């Protein structure tokens, strides 16, 4: 299983295995990663799974679609590397992905 590295706002590093086909958000929820709230359950309707993808990985992800781009406009402190983790599907190609969890508890 691919390992995803979540860095929470308090500086804690969580390296967890996430099953292929799951979203990065589901991996966070299943492993109790603080900061990934996921109020909508992964429907791309709330931006509470907002995170910053490490620069080394941004080009390795599929491009965001218009719905995700629009929803990120509602995210707190959107940056060029912002993504909704519910929209990133885990695969072997993402083994080692580094995700910086945004402040989603506002």
Image (tube, helix red, strand yellow):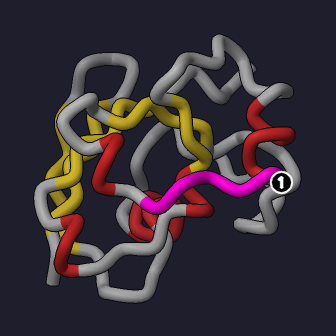
Q: Nearer the viewer, residue 40 or 83?
A: 83
Q: Is residue 102 magenta?
A: no
Decide if residue 61 is on the left or right side of residue 79: left
Where the C terminus falls, by quadrant?
Answer: top right
Residue indicated by mark 1: 67
Residue 59 against residue 77 in the figure, above or below: below
User: Residue drawn 75% across and 67% down?
Assistant: 41
In this orientation, which residue lies closer to the viewer: 15 or 100? 100
- The answer to which of 83 and 65 lies nearer the viewer is 65
- For the point 40% across and 68% down, which residue is it? 27
Residue at 80% x, 51% y is: 66
The picture quadrant where one finds residue 22 is bottom left
Magenta residues, dominant SS class? loop
Which residue extends farthest top? Answer: 77
- Looking at the rendering, the stretch of residues picked out in magenta corresponds to 62-66
Q: Quadrant of the N terminus?
A: bottom left
> Residue 28 appears at what percent x and percent y?
43, 58
> Magenta stretch containing residue 65, yes or no?
yes
Left or right of residue 99, residue 79 in this image: right
Q: Is residue 85 left or right of residue 1?
A: right
Q: Residues within 10 Å of mark 1 (few under 14, many from 20)?
A: few
Judging from the image, what secondary structure is the residue with disc 1 in? helix
Residue 105, percent across and down? 67, 26
Q: Quadrant of residue 86?
A: bottom right
């Amino acid at each position: 299983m691919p390992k995803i590295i979540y860095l929470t706002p308090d500086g804690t590093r969580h390296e967890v295995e996430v099953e292929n086909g799951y979203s990065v958000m589901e991996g966070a929820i299943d492993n109790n990663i603080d900061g990934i709230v996921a109020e909508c359950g992964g429907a791309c309707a709330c931006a509470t799974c907002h995170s910053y993808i490490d620069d080394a990985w941004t080009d390795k992800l599929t491009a965001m679609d218009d719905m995700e781009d629009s929803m990120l406009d509602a995210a707190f402190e959107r940056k060029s590397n912002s993504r909704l983790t519910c929209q990133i599907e885990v695969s072997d190609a993402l083994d080692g992905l580094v995700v910086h969890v945004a402040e989603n508890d506002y």
